[in-house]
Amino acid sequence: MKLIKKYMRKLYTTSLILLLLISLSACKGNKKKSTVEVTKHSAETLYNKAKKYMELEIWDNAILFYKNLRNQYPFGRYAEQGTLELAYSYYRDYDMELAISTLDRFIKNYPAHEHLDYAYYLKGLVYFESDRGFFQRIKPDTALDRNQENAKQAFVAFKTFIEKFPNSQYTPDARQRLIYLRNKLGAFELQVAKYYLRRKAYVAAINRCKYVIETFQKTGAVADSLAVMAQAYKELHEDELAKTSLAVLQENFPNHPYLKGEPLDLKINVFSFKDLWIFSKKK
């Protein structure tokens, strides 16, 4: 009996030590991204702390305080403005998905907010910047239709913003970005059409050209799309359709090289951001 009691005491002591070791290990391994500690504060205090970190560009700390502000005080003017600034902090911290979801929540919950225009503008900016890596180079040989979604989302977001807030202080910048996106997306579709023409996928090339002509009017891609479409129809022996395409090209772009008998340039071009960003052309 004494042996059993002795054994049980030893087992209890060992278990307690193991439990303490596990607790210490868990505490050590459970590191937070932010080193600051948030305790119960007033809404104003939490907002001011978050704002301070945002102005210092310490994004993880700003996000931590904005989130706690939202959780502890979900209503009121600090919560409203804090939600918008939380979205901006996510954007600057390169967390695009959370930035978009936070902006969508802000737009839905605060449709009469004085800075609603900025929320719509920022949504376009998030999509725009998240796709810049793709925008540096367009190579349909390897990319084709991949990675266009953010560009299209940015296009839609800026278009929606301009329609809703034509007199906003952010509208001029949004218009320039919309021009850039229209040119970029049109250029990409043209590159894909050329790629299909090189691969003798003539119907696919024609469909891409039609999409450019219908969707990206007043861009530099339209003229070449008409030329590519005419060539694709020729290859398919659709002579009447080829003549129609050439007639439209002649009427709108009479000096196009293709009309002078020059062969189409079917090489895949590589574009830089400066090629199509209108601000870079202003000196």
Image (cartoon, rainbow, N blue to C red):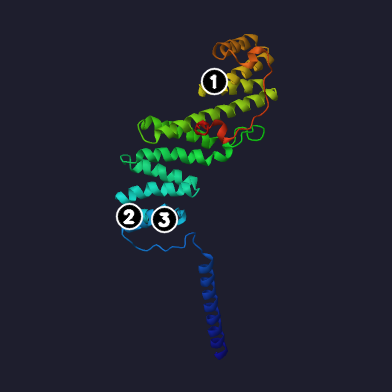
**Residue tagged 2:** 73
Q: Is residue 252 visible?
A: yes
Q: Are marks 1 and 3 in contact (CB under 8 Å)?
A: no
Q: Secondary structure at mark 2?
A: loop
Q: State the image coordinates of residue 76 (x, y, percent, origin top left).
A: 29, 50
Q: Assess disc 1: are there few (<14), some (14-19) or many (≥20) residues with their C-alpha within 10 Å of its C-alpha.
A: some
The local secondary structure at tag 1 comes to helix
Vertical order, 47 against 108 (above or below): below
Q: Nearer the viewer, mark 1 or mark 3?
A: 3
Q: Earlier in the sequence, mark 1 or mark 3?
A: 3
x, y (%) of residue 168? Answer: 36, 34
Q: Is residue 166 left or right of residue 22?
A: left
Q: Nearer the viewer, residue 226 or 234?
A: 226
The residue singled out by tag 3 in the image is 53
- In the structure shown, which secondary structural element does the residue marked by tag 3 occupy? helix
Residue at the image point whose x is 39% and y is 55% from the top: 52
| Mark 2 to mark 3 CA distance (whole Å) | 19 Å
Q: Which residue is mark 1?
A: 213
